[in-house]
Image: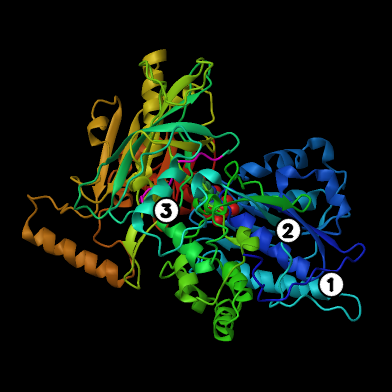
Amino acid sequence: MGESVEAASVAKPATIEGRNIIILYGSETGNGEEIAMELAKMAERLHFNTVVDEMDAFKLTDLLRYSLAIFVTSTTGQGDMPKNTTTFWKNLRRTKLNNTNCLAPVKFTIFGLGDSSYPKFNWAARKLRVRLLQLGASEFFRPGEADERHENGLDSIYLPWYQELRESLLSQFPLPEGMEPIPDDVQLPPKYNIRLGSVKDKITNGEGHLSPAEDGEKLAAKFERMSTDSQENEAPGQKDGTGVPDFPPAKLLPIPGSFTAEVVCNKRVTPEDHWQDVRHIELKVRAPGRNGAVSFAGQTLLIYPKNYPEDVQKLIDLMGWGEVAEQRIEIDWAKNTRPRDYHFPQGATVRDVLTHNFDITAVPKRTFLEFMAYHTTNPLEKERLQELTQRGDSDEFYDYTSRPRRTILEVLEDFPGVKIPYTRLLEFPIIRAREFSLCNGGDPTVKEDQVISNSNEQGRDNVYKFEILAALVHYRTIIRKPRQGLCSRYLRHLPVGTTIQIGIKPPSSPFAMDDLSFYSRPLIGVATGTGIAPFRALLQDRCCLVQNKEKMMGPTLLFFGCRNAAADYHFQAEWRPVPNLVVHPAFSRDNTSDTSSSSTEEEEETKLAALQRAAGIYDAGKNYVQHQIRQHAAEVGKLLRENPIIVVCGNSGRMPKSVREALEDAAVVSGVVSDKEEAKGWFDRRENCVYWQETW
Ligand SMILES: Cc1cc2nc3c(=O)[nH]c(=O)nc-3n(C[C@H](O)[C@H](O)[C@H](O)COP(=O)(O)O)c2cc1C
């Protein structure tokens, strides 16, 4: 097995003195990073010497070395900058830079990613832009602001912005006579070089690669060996009757700052016949002790899902990588190009990285389909892939990819002529950690003398309990294919006792507050579905503090949107004993009409709902959290007068906006503000309340 022949030609960008560009990104979940990478490729095609990096890895003064800068940043938390921009942002805001015009030579443009259901839409990009301008930098191209809420998501704004930017770069910074941009059907060279090392003895045992014809028993044995290879803490292999274990091996990735956790509970909390499988998962983590009170409310747990062996095998077969699958790979990166979130298991083989690192069941991005077009020798396939990825016409692309949620693996099956050489393996998207709000708070230290199997010898570490409430994604798409998310599938079958790698992400504001008065302030919680998780954590924090410090817990109102009282009214037994807490559940699918109401009242209600529907009011006749807020406007108003904390968690979409409007209405009805106009800005002022939204 040698190198596969690359179907498309490869061209290197020319080196032109002074023609350089820096692309700096801030990103929490990878969207901004992907856009930055795509922009970098575009700039390289225009023969710009291009560097792309996260903001925090870049020195502010180095900005002056580049003729152009492109900033890409998402907004996180409550209008906050992403974590990987904090140092850069802090440096940029130093007061001693004020009035210095120190960035006068910098020409920049900025692209923001946001979600207009958040009150502070695209604030990170806006703040950054204002500060750059304040320091004397000038814009060479207009800023862009993408919105997740648009029909085609971020692309609705991003694609036209990208096209215009490209044209603007070419016209403002023309190429020297006779030089052309590198066309899209010619590949850029990779930034890495993959070398194959030795065959991993334990796995192959000298048997060579797995052929599809190999008998099931042998295959199973091989996977068994893989899953116990060099690991003492492996998950038990689970066979599904076909001879292939259906659970990925529990190899742990060397992710900096991560923890090893043991799964101690993985329980479905919704009835079997409920539409959604919601899991209460409990993990035990050994970590260095912390002094004093620990608050976990608002923190996010990161879980790194893995691919299933059968999917990995399918990809290996499709790509013809059988002969290299068990060989170790070594990667050399061009200077400063190694992406930060590539954490390969030690001594990883091709199969290992496919299992643990690359998201082969993700819905492919446009750039992946473009990349596939380079690697088919079938002209019809090439033409179809090029058609699908035309930037002017997104609909065909979405109809084929995101609307039916087609996976990379399925797309590769649809285009059997595509043979990606293993040397381009890193073009597959990386598996990103999935984020879950912690649902426990208070003191999470595990008191009993329980030992985690891989505990660290020093023995001084504390053992903490982390809990999450995970709604597993499982649905039928418009092409009637059943789908489940990579992480959902992983969590559904994650056996108790398994050791997994997790990360903990600090809370966005305001939970970082140490101020004890925070706990005695009134709290208005609005949660839908598993959005109850951070609220429960916060409530446990408050209860814990009340017990420890004998402080009064502030009055708490919870509006909790569920479908049915019997199915997804999560943690209902826990609410009753909490002092000073009033819960108003909104059961959207239960028959909520009062049994004592007369048939005329019911008829009236039905008529009203019909009228509302005709007027385009989407939630007509429903019982959602926003209705409960309006119904209890007086109670809400009472707390609004006392500088409350307002927490809105759960589904994104229309919920956050409807809730905000309902709160504004409650403020008007209860006389906190005189009219709707005044109400609009009222919630953004910290002297009135702390407004915290976390929706997904
Ligand atoms: C916890 C959370 C908080 C967010 N806060 C905001 C916000 O305040 N304003 C906004 O415009 N978008 C907000 N967003 C939306 C993100 O900016 C958007 O999803 C973006 O595509 C994420 O890009 P990234 O993966 O590069 O971080 C938030 C998203 C999450 C998950």
Cα separation between marks 3 and 1: 49 Å
Position of 404 with respect to 621 (left or right) is right
* Residue at the (48%, 32%) spot, across then down: 260
* In the rendered image, the vertical position of residue 168 relative to residue 647, given as above or below: below
Queried whether the magenta region covers residue 248, the answer comes back as: yes
Cα separation between marks 2 and 1: 28 Å
Q: Residues within 10 Å of mark 3 (few under 14, many from 20)?
A: many
- Secondary structure under tag 3 reads loop
The span shown in magenta is 245-253
Cα separation between marks 2 and 3: 28 Å
Queried whether the magenta region covers residue 147, the answer comes back as: no
Q: Nearer the viewer, mark 2 or mark 3?
A: 3
- Image x and y of residue 116, in percent: 52, 57
Q: Which residue is mark 3?
A: 308
Residue 212 position by quadrant: bottom left
* In the rendered image, the vertical position of residue 344 relative to residue 37, given as above or below: above
Q: Which mark is residue 191?
A: 2
Assess mark 1: CB under 8 A from ligand 1?
A: no
Q: Is residue 78 visible?
A: no
* In the rendered image, the vertical position of residue 342 relative to residue 282, given as above or below: below
- Callout count: 3
Q: Amino acid at mark 2?
A: Lys
Between discs 3 and 1, the one toward the N terminus: 1
- Image x and y of residue 58, in percent: 77, 45
Colour scheme shown: rainbow
- Secondary structure under tag 1 reads helix
Q: Residues within 10 Å of mark 2 (few under 14, many from 20)?
A: some
Q: Nearer the viewer, mark 2 or mark 1?
A: 2
* Residue at the (50%, 50%) spot, across then down: 204
Q: Residues within 10 Å of mark 1 (few under 14, many from 20)?
A: few
Between discs 2 and 3, the one toward the N terminus: 2
